[in-house]
Amino acid sequence: MASNIDSLIVQRALGSHTKNVNLSTERLATGFRINRPSDDAAGYVYSEKLDAQVRGMDAAQRNINDGIATLDTADTSLTTVLDNLQRIREIVVEANGGGQTPAELDAGQIEINNLVQEISDLRTTTEFNGRRLLDGTFNQNIQNGPNNGNTYALDFSTAGWNRMNLGVTSSTTIGDLGYYAAADTSTKALNMISVSTGVASLGGATTGVAATDLDRLDRLIRNASSMQASTSARRNRLSSDYNFLTDLKFNYESAKSNVMDADIALESTRLTINQVLQQSAVSLLSQANSSPQLALSLIP
């Protein structure tokens, strides 16, 4: 016989079964239905697009955590500022009682001076990653999503209610610690609060305590409280962004899994079927290759 058609047919079937066995084995070993673009070109492109989104969300969540850490740092300093302001107000109230001696007033003024100095120091020493947060200059855009335009402005420098500047001198800018109402033309600021004529305040005033100082301290406390409320509101916003990305990432991961992941039950069944067919083809190939020998029996 010039050609063994049966053998060729079985060889072709054996090659197909072997390819299918190898494909199912690879999918079961990797857990992926698509291991290379040739497995499913369109599915591969789609899965890479989904993967870019998921990885972008991971990076955005890290950015959000940095933003939350920034706000927590500012909040910690503002808590200290408020504690100091409350203590200064307490000293002023005591000084207004009229029962303290000059030495006691001097001691109170020394404490005020130190508390004011600490607030002033916090203005320049409150930093996150080397950037000052509470001197009225911090302005940072946070990429809080995977795509272009997904940003949130963490801006402490705008001249509005969200400004954060711990300057202890007088200020006319809304949002600064030393800001007073527009109708208040006074220039007396935190570093000029004085309860003693014997110890000069940081601003050099030695005029003694005044009842209006309590009003100004109340405004300073209000301003510091507004700053802290701003950090809390922003933190809640970023926490909400983080939670949203967590839910959104789950949806994208699920979609990617539908495209990329192998169906283990299905592939196991296919592997078993193709292994049986492969073994059958090997047996039949042996028989097909021996068929030509039958022709020899016809030769005398």
Image (cartoon, rainbow, N blue to C red):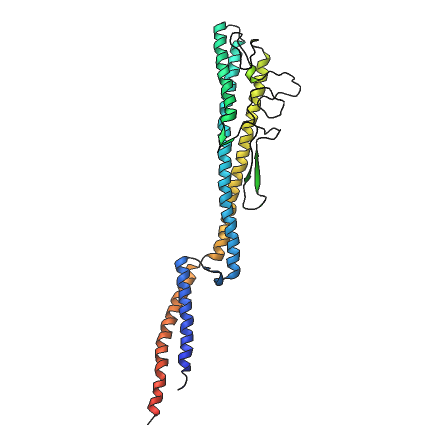
The residue at 37%/70% (across/down) is 276
The residue at 55%/34% (across/down) is 234
Picture coordinates of residue 297, whole percent (x, y)? 33, 90
Query: Do we see residue 78 in this rendering?
Result: no
Query: Do we see residue 288 in this rendering?
Result: yes
Query: Could you tell me which quadrant the C terminus lies in?
Result: bottom left
**Which quadrant of the view contains residue 28?**
bottom left
Q: Is residue 63 above or below residue 78?
A: below
Depth check: give the residue in front, 110 or 104: 110
Picture coordinates of residue 152, whole percent (x, y)? 57, 38
Picture coordinates of residue 256, whole percent (x, y)? 49, 54
Depth check: give the residue in front, 279 or 269: 279
The residue at 52%/52% (across/down) is 50
Residue that sits furthest to the right in the current view:
183
Q: Is residue 223 above or below residue 152?
A: above
**Which quadrant of the view contains residue 32?**
bottom left
Query: Could you tell me which quadrant the N terminus lies in?
Result: bottom left
Count all numbered tags in the image, as a single digit: 0
